[in-house]
Amino acid sequence: MKTRILVAACTALAVSFGAQANETKPEDLIKARQAAYAFIAWNMGRVRANTEPQAVYNKDDVIKAANAIQAVANAGLGQLYAKGTEKGTGFRETRVKPEVFMPEHGAKLGEIAGNFNKEANALAAVAAKGDKDAVRAQLGKLGETCKACHDSFRTK
Amino acid sequence: MKTRILVAACTALAVSFGAQANETKPEDLIKARQAAYAFIAWNMGRVRANTEPQAVYNKDDVIKAANAIQAVANAGLGQLYAKGTEKGTGFRETRVKPEVFMPEHGAKLGEIAGNFNKEANALAAVAAKGDKDAVRAQLGKLGETCKACHDSFRTK
């Protein structure tokens, strides 16, 4: 009886420690990162549509989209590139390149990620002011940071 | 020559109007809504892991996750249920029930969506204070609003 209780207690503890370390399965992390970028892409599309030359600019819609982009970008996406997520299938097979996980590319990756966050924060700030042309220009800057990462760290 | 220019101009105009209406393809909207909820789910998992009894609570991590949940919840997700998205495949086949698109269920759906936003906003506010037990309790309230929608408006 004592042994059974001890086993149960240890199992509970192991579950707790597992939770503490947030040991999410690699495929769930890959799914979450695909979700993050897909949601950002939809919101960037909304901003782009609002800033087309012929479009009627909807300031509130752009603010919501920009705030979502900012929060997702700043959510701590680095956690989604944990060891074990180099290959695998979330919603679909990951397109991440092995270079993302190589220390010698860390500086470049960090710079791109930092630029991505910086331009996402700037987009939210510009969106709040409601100047269509400024938002369009800032969206372009954000898009460049997306492209920089795709060019180096994602397969086509 | 004049005709060719006119055709080109009309095409450009049509493209612009298409962008103005933000006529995203139904499958892209379905993908974006699957992305939104998958990203929320990952962030709720982070908050949950932080608030397990044995877990070391990381206030900053919880704030980032809660802010992301809040921004996604408030991004205007209703747009992702546009006409044409009743059936279809984004990342995978949608599990949305037809009831979502039936006017007679609008009031109930609106109430659930409103509660979801309210509890997501509250989670971000509670997370900012850093009280582990309060965050855990608020996460539970948010989870109830997720369940309410799944029970009525999503297939198993």
Image (tube, coloured by chain):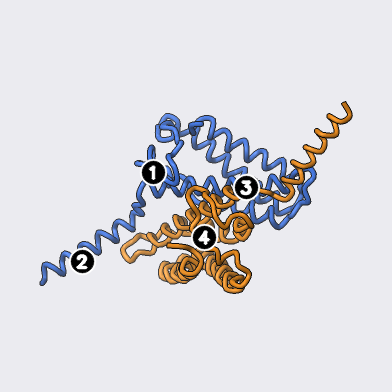
Chain colours: A orange, B blue
- Is the residue marked by circle 4 packed among few (<14), some (14-19), or many (20+) residues within 10 Å? many
Which amino acid type corresponds to the residue marked 3 in the rendered image?
Lys
* Front one among B117 and A99: A99
Callout 1: chain: B
Q: Chain of mark 2?
A: B
Task: Indicate the amino acid at tag 2.
Answer: Ala
On whether disc 1 and disc 3 are found on a single subunit, the reply is: no
Earlier residue among tags 1 and 2: 2
Residue A34 in the figure: left or right of residue B122: left
Task: Provide the secondary structure element on which disc 4 rests.
Answer: loop
Looking at the image, which residue is at 41% across and 48% down? B29
Q: Amino acid at mark 1?
A: Ala
Residue B151 position in % (x across, y down)? 54, 30
Q: Rounded to the nearest whole Å, what is the CA distance between mark 4 and mark 2?
A: 40 Å
Q: Which mark is residue B82?
A: 1
Residues at marks 1 and 4, CA–CA distance in whole angstroms = 31 Å
Q: Residue B66: x, y in percent?
A: 64, 51
Viewed as shown, does residue A100 lie left or right of A45? right
Residue bearing the label numbered 4: A96
When asked about the image quadrant of residue B17, the answer is bottom left
Q: Quadrant of the N terminus of chain A?
A: top right
Residue that carries the numbered disc 3 in the rendered image:
A25
The answer to whether one can see residue A129 in this image is no
Q: Horizontal placement of B151 versus B143: left or right? A: left
Mark identifier at residue B9? 2
- Check if mark 4 and mark 3 are on a common chain: yes
Mark 4 or mark 3: whose residue is earlier in sequence: 3
Of tags 4 and 2, the one toward the viewer is 4
Label 1 – label 3 distance at C-alpha: 33 Å
Q: Which of pointers 1 and 4 indicates the residue nearer the eye?
A: 4
